Amino acid sequence: MLKSLLVPIISLMALQSCAQKDSNTKTKKEAKKMTTTTTNTNLDTATFGTGCFWCTEAVFQQLNGVEKVTSGYSGGHTAKPTYKEVCSGTTGYAECLNIVYDTTKITFDELLEVFWQVHDPTTLNRQGADVGTQYRSVVFYHNDEQKAKVEKYKAELDKSGAWDNPVVTSIEKMEIFYPAEDYHQNYYINNTGDGYCQFVIRPKVEKFEKVFKDKLKKTPNP
């Protein structure tokens, strides 16, 4: 199933590069450290890098139990990176998604299942037409339990032969997450008529909906 899902996804992603769609006419707010304040003790956080964050933000937003998805940057070595700086490939940051979820409705294991299937974890520092360390496949673990699970599933996937090539997903400790500029948030929801959304993101979302239809919420929340 993984091979049949990944082939059309990868070919569609090659149609256009995420970085090519950046607009200099939009105001970019200063990035800041991500903080979550809540009284719900059932909430936890997962942080995944799957290439261009526009492409998979819309996927995770649809999962029942996911409370909030924020596009941003992690894994780098400079303070307060901008999109332009991250796209240069010199900051060490990866485009990623910070996913706040309700553990009574969805588990980290289930989120990992989606993670493995909605991008190609065998291409080093590349997803389709997007090339560079900023597009690396990566899981930023928040605790030892998450780390152990990612290592276990990565090893099992390699042994299973689900892909022809080895899984190169990086496993990195979460240090800091900077939310991306406002115009990157809820990109698919706010730009459904855009060509990139129509030809790259929409087909990926539709295939995801077919495979994970039993895990979807009725109305995706931004």
Image (cartoon, helix red, strand yellow):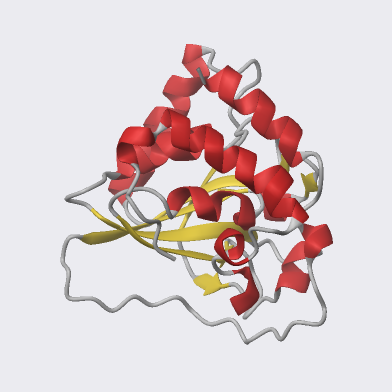
Residue nearer the viewer, 166 or 72: 72
Estimate the x, y position of residue 137 in percent, counting from the top left.
Answer: 60, 43
Furthest residue to the front?
A: 193
Estimate the x, y position of residue 3 in percent, counting from the top left.
Answer: 59, 19
Q: Residue at x 79, y 59 (%)?
A: 19
> With 98 as the anchor, is 183 left or right in this view?
right
Residue nearer the viewer, 168 or 19: 19
Q: In this view, does 3 lie above or below 42?
A: above
Could you tell me if residue 197 is visible in this image? yes
Q: Quadrant of residue 216?
A: top left
Q: In this view, does 111 lie above or below 35?
A: above
Q: Quadrant of residue 207?
A: top right
> With 19 as the anchor, is 49 left or right in this view?
left
Estimate the x, y position of residue 141 in percent, counting from the top left.
Answer: 41, 52
Q: Which residue is drawn at 46% across and 30% down?
A: 210
Q: Which residue is drawn at 63% across and 86% down?
A: 29
Q: Residue at x 32, y 39 (%)?
A: 215
Estimate the x, y position of residue 57 in percent, counting from the top left.
Answer: 53, 55
Q: In which quarter of the image is the C terminus?
A: bottom left
Could you tell me if residue 181 is visible in this image? no
Q: How many labels does the image show?
A: 0
Residue nearer the viewer, 43 or 144: 43
> With 38 as the anchor, is 138 left or right in this view?
right
